[in-house]
Image (tube, coloured by chain):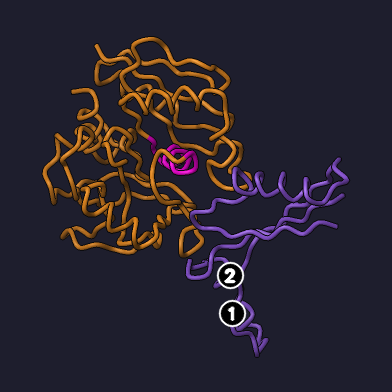
Amino acid sequence: MKNIAVLQFPGTNCDLDTKYAFEKLGCNTTVIWHKETKLPENTDLVVVPGGFSYGDYLRSGAIAQFSPIMKAVIEHANHGGQVLGICNGFQILTEVGLLPGALKRNINLHFISKFQTLKVINNSNNFLQKCDNNEILNIPIAHADGNYYIDEESYKELEANEQILVRYCDENGEPVVVNGSVTSIAGVCNSTKNVFGLMPHPERALENILGSEDGIKMLEGLIA
Amino acid sequence: MTAIVNIFLKEGVLDPQGKAIHHALDAMNFEGVNDVRMGKQIILKLTSTNKDDAMKEVSKMAEDILANTVIEDYTIELV
């Protein structure tokens, strides 16, 4: 059984949804308060869930990156451990430097909350190994700062290393502008492909009765 | 001593808030505005009385947390 650590900062609000998701997938899941300095032993995956850590003060994720638990998360990642950042978790992972780029205010300045189709760009990683390239997934988004920015040179590296995970697309798979992200990027991974971040919420897409179960095959990849 | 840190998105990084303000100014018939950039200002009251030390310290704060240098530039003024 895989051991999952779900972080909780002041202002995190997707911790219990995320715990529910991994428990549904048969994992041993623990919520870890940000003031802890150690992860539970034998942690297989750290999930930095969504929400509004520290009220998004200064910048989304800017303050949370200095919480005591983050040192342990960086160490876990540097030793090859898996880390997944969802929404605010993605913002925190870019702020702390575990993922490239940054998330800016949405181009239309609105908080966008809706189901969104995503196209799988690279499945050559654990996270998306259960998905096909070009597969279209239906996953909710809910964010104000999801406008992914990366400079041109780093973008070329992302593309060459197959680090682009998913892009926002229409029902035919054509890229669409949702929040202003560079080439409609919705999620990326690091160059060693053990740290993943995305704005959409796979933990909110586990049951068809709630609109989609496409999130299952994303999360399943990390615990396979 | 007081440090005034101004933080703005880098030139070339699209500033959606600045653009929205520009649009509003246009709608209110304020003419003659070419561009609007929006940023933030952080004012720090320092214990230090040495300008060089203060500049060094505040620069580190700006690099480490106050600005995200992937997308933002900053200026520091000591008064």
Classify 10 Å Cα crowding around label 2: few (below 14), some (14-19), many (20 and above): some
**How many marks overall?**
2
The chain letter for the residue carrying disc 1 is B
* Chain A as rendered: colour: orange
Residue highlighted by disc 2: B18
Give coordinates of residue A52: x percent, y percent.
54, 39
Residue A55's disc is none
Residue at (37, 47) in percent of width and height: A141
Establish if A25 lies above or below A172. above
Give coordinates of residue A49: x percent, y percent.
43, 32
Residue B35's disc is 1
Q: Magenta includes B48?
A: no
Q: Mark 2 and mark 1 in contact (Cβ < 8 Å)?
A: yes
Residue interval drawn in magenta: A85-96
Chain identifier, colour purple: B
Classify 10 Å Cα crowding around label 1: few (below 14), some (14-19), many (20 and above): few
Q: Is residue A147 left or right of residue A42?
A: right
Q: Quadrant of residue A82?
A: top left
Give coordinates of residue B48: x percent, y percent.
85, 42
Inter-mark Cα distance, 1 to 2: 8 Å
Give coordinates of residue A146: x percent, y percent.
43, 52
Secondary structure under tag 2 reads: helix
Residue at (48, 38) in percent of width and height: A96
Q: Is residue B9 left or right of residue A48?
A: right
Main SS of the magenta segment?
helix
Establish if A199 lies above or below A20. below
Q: Depth check: A222 or A194 in front?
A: A194
Question: Can marks 1 and 2 be said to lie on one chain?
Answer: yes
The chain letter for the residue carrying disc 2 is B
